[in-house]
Amino acid sequence: METILLITLFVPLLGAIINGVFGSPFKKYAHWVAVPAIGISWLGALYLLKFVMAGNTLNVNLWQWIPVKDFNVHFGLMLDPLSAVMIATVTTVSFFIHIYSIGYMHGDPGYRRYFAYLNLFVFSMLMLVLANNYVLLFVGWEAVGLCSYLLIGFWYEKKSASDAGKKAFIVNRIGDAGFILGIFTMFFAVGAVDYKTVFAAAPQLSAVIVGSITFFLFMGAIGKSAQFPLYVWLPDAMEGPTPVSALIHAATMVTAGVYMVARSSALYSAHGSIANAVASIGAFTAIFAASIALVNDDIKRVLAYSTISQLGYMFIGVGVGAYATGIFHLYTHAFFKALLFLTAGSVMHALHGELNMQKMGGLFKKMPHTGITFIIGALALSGIPPLAGFYSKDSILKEALVRGHTTIWWVGTITAFMTAFYMFRLIFMVFFGEPRDRELYEHAHESPAVMTIPLWILAIGAISAGWVGIGEDASPFFKFLAPSLHYAEHGVHFEPAAWQEWLPLIFGVAGILLAWSMYMKRIPSPVGMARAFKPIYKLLKGKYYVDEIYNIFIVKPIYYLAIILFKLVDRILIDGTVNGVAWVNRATGAVLNKIQTGAVKTYMLWIVFAATLIMWLQLLK
Amino acid sequence: MKLDLLSLVIFFPVIGAIPIFFMSPKNKKMLFDYTLLITLIEFLFSLFLLKDFKFSLYGFQHEHIYQWIPAIGASYHIGIDGMSLILILLTTFLTALGILSSYNYITHKAKEYVIVMLLMETGMIGVFASLDLLLFYLFWELMLIPMYFLIGIWGHERRVYAAFKFVIYTMAGSALLITGILVLYFYNHQQTGIYTFDLLKLYRLNVPYGLAKKLFLAFAIAFAIKVPIFPFHTWLPDAHVEAPTAGSVLLAGVLLKMGIYGFLRFAFPLFPAAALHYAPFFMALGIIGIIYGAFMSWVQKDLKKLVAYSSVAHLGFIVLGIFTFNMYGTQGAIIQMVNHGLSTGALFFIVGMLYERRHTRLIEEFGGLAKVMPVFSTIFGIVMLSSIGLPGLNGFIGEFLVMLGAFKATKVAAFFAVLGIIFAAVYMLTMFQRVVFLKVKEKNLGLPDISLREFFVLAPILVFIFWIGVYPKPYLKMTEPSAHAVIYQIKSAQNADRLKELIKPNEMVSINRRNAR
């Protein structure tokens, strides 16, 4: 079984190496390496899932990685229910994204490079979820950051693309810096960084220590999983090829933070304060990002903000201590979000890369497969039963309520309304109504089968993925995950009223109806609404100006500080002193030249001699 | 007198340089072929040092002592431990690559160039192998002169200024160093009645606290200039920019390490109590170096200057590491010395290759290289990531351990140090974007991708970048006794009551041997 674990993990890496290093003579056939590599990994993951479902786990240390004194990190892997669910989800979604990419990236000059990065991305994520200690997790953690950097900036000739890639890496690094501090705190408190030892020691740690560890680790999660205030890289990440967005949003990157918090459930449930902060930040991010998505006209950016918002839900789940619900939503979200991005990619493919929804319309007739699957994805995202998103979102909100987080529940419920609204605003603008741009519309066409078949398969997932979690704690999904998660005793237990159980769904349906009435019937007309709420509309349209604020108050000041330091300290202060000394030296030399050689070395010798003499005389005293 | 292996490694480059005097200066290719052969044999010899080396043993191996100037108690005393060995290997490795990279770069005075390079190699190895203070000082000075010529003769436009600045700075350091050595030498005579420069004998000397503080500062400033520690760093960007590629590589890869090596081998064990006393101060300087170096790199327009300032940041990490006085920080610092030699060395090679193609180092002149030089750009990318400490590559191991050590010593230090890894990403990625990504400029359109010779300069470095990143254990084990010995000496001094006791390294070695399983 260990061999299968290694195959599952390393075959994608092998694929990346083959394509990356040796692939240039066969660049048109790169997918013949990359797709089977993920295929093998996928089958391996499913096999491992079955193995774990039979009640087994694996924990293997492959080699001693960093041994220094008592700091002893192994290159070690762990397979338990949580990592099994993760690898199965990741490889399943990735596999179909790989197949879809064959069609989408066809003819791109960077075809081979693309598939090499894609394989590397999957490898990094598998590494992240399979590690059995925090330092190795960090390897995967930064490696997915690297892959996102490479893939977001894939079309590197475009300045916006390479800027976005750079931004993703740097913003992630800010979180990573916190994560490292978390590892340090953990190591000096526990004396180890492997999950087993740390989780066993967690209950005995003081509140301050656990608080610091979980706080710092969560900093990493904020960066990686694009939560407020470090979410800014994710909307820009749209610069990458669309299947990459699907990969980043669904499988291989942003979910890492949720996974990490769930993995660290023993720490997060040891003391509640940071966990509450996790839930609050999740809730705030959920509604914050959803509000931006309400007015955005870029089809991919709407989806990007929806991801940020949905990740917020997941953090509500893991933050309130209902870890399984967070992972459940992560798992269902992987299907419908991958589906939504791939369908959006299909739309772009048909419209020659057009992203502006104001130029679309009526496309359903032209591309029925894309249209239907998109609607399925949107219904799932909006939490409409019996689609996947309904069960997972519902269970998160219910758990929040049961554990007494009423405010968070309200925020999540209102967000559900917004989610349904902006998704169906998108659908009505893109697929229905009159075409706004005739020429684009005339040239639109349905995508080839290599792209639509993955859409349908993911659509099936978006419909049915949630069924394994019906009934929550009693369901197979929750029961399966339970051994990996540590639950805290929560003192409060509210029994939600009937209306509270139904409200999120009602809000979701209301959101769809409002979108229909506004964008199909123009009651009230969107333009009128924008005019009526002009300040709010402008604020949302400007995305709360967060990027601008960061730029003015953080990036620019540091940059100018660097320039001032360079000019003032390095050039004038230090160099000035040194050159001054040199000048004095030379001037003295010129004077002494009459009686001396004038060589610097001679002076130095005299200095040495004199200094020695003085110090020696001191000693003799 | 039988020639031992270590002496052979030290002097082989000079011996190998003798036939060059009889070669024709016109046949540049033959000169370089021959020198490359010498440096490769030298690398092989240095690998032989590994053969009988016992990695678990404390103290020095390959130790030899011959009389040199008996009248003043100076001896030819050489010997290496894991730390010296790893640095010697780094030296022979980078020198051979440096010669390989110089075939096209050096256009005039090729004969003198290869002689100077070989002379410098002997000087560098000698520094790492000397166990006698006078011998150490001799080698220390010996390697400065070739570097001065490298910058002054084969440098660029402002080479005279840079070489002069280099000399002023380093001579000031040397003056302090020899003063310190001599005072220690006379103090030892006063105490024991023996004139000796032998390091192992001087280790036993218990220098009174007041004097120790002065002497520590004399040694420390001398080494700080070499490292360089802020604010003694301004010679570095100028020297780097003006030096020819191989000069920059050796300057960054090896010469800067001599400062750190000096702290660990001389300043700490000789004056442990004083080292403890000044530790917070130097840790602060290390942190300033990390952040200041990053800031400086960020605003540079010259590619080579950017890499030079990034060295200030990297060395800041190493300084921070050695002053933590714990295993994590010290081991991290030692492995980071090797890592910095590899990744910054490779970066200088890369800048040199770009310079050979375009005869400019200005960042704005490049752009879009990924399109025209894909293989080169990929290697550049990997080296760049190694430099910013991406996990899985070598840089991470060192930086992580240093920060871990800093966290143990003082948490504040670790907080500032992690800022350094964010800034490192900022300046490196910004540079990389402007050079490798974006639209290709017309004047860069015809640039040839990496040549076979260039590939063989960079590929060996890549091997180590991955190896140390994925499996650093052999390297960490190699330097473990060295790091342990330094910390042991410091910790012994930490207890104020034991300050008055003599710290006898021989006893220490035997204690440690018992402790080491």
Image (spheres, coloured by chain):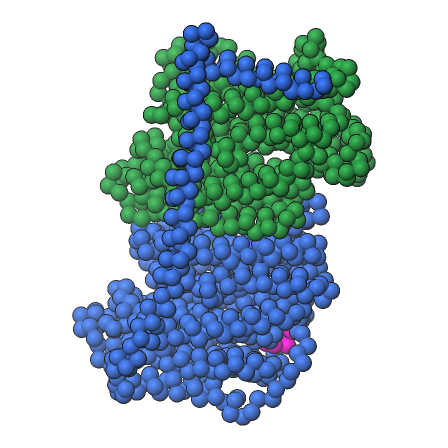
Chain colours: A blue, B green
- Asked if residue B75 lies left or right of residue B99, the reply is right
Residue at 49% in and 56% down? A174
- Is residue B411 a member of the stretch shown in magenta? no
Q: Nearer the viewer, residue A425 or B208?
A: B208
Q: Quadrant of residue A80?
A: bottom right
In this picture, is A212 found above or below A477? above
- Asked if residue B375 lies left or right of residue A477, the reply is left
Decide whether the magenta segment is chiefly helix, strand or loop.
Answer: helix
Question: Is residue B182 in view?
Answer: yes
In this picture, is A500 found above or below B57? below
- Asked if residue B31 lies left or right of residue B266, the reply is left
Q: Quadrant of residue B496?
A: top right
Q: Nearer the viewer, residue B111 or A540?
A: A540
The N terminus of chain A lies in quadrant: bottom right
The C terminus of chain A lies in quadrant: top right
Residue at 69% in and 27% down? B211
Pinpoint residue A231: horizontal percent, then vertical percent: 44, 64
In this picture, is A431 found above or below A83? below
Pinpoint residue B359: horizontal percent, then vertical percent: 31, 31
In this picture, is B397 found above or below A430? above
Pinpoint residue B317: horizontal percent, then vertical percent: 55, 41
Q: Quadrant of residue A614?
A: top right
**Range of magenta residues:** A477-482
Residue at 59% in and 82% down? A404
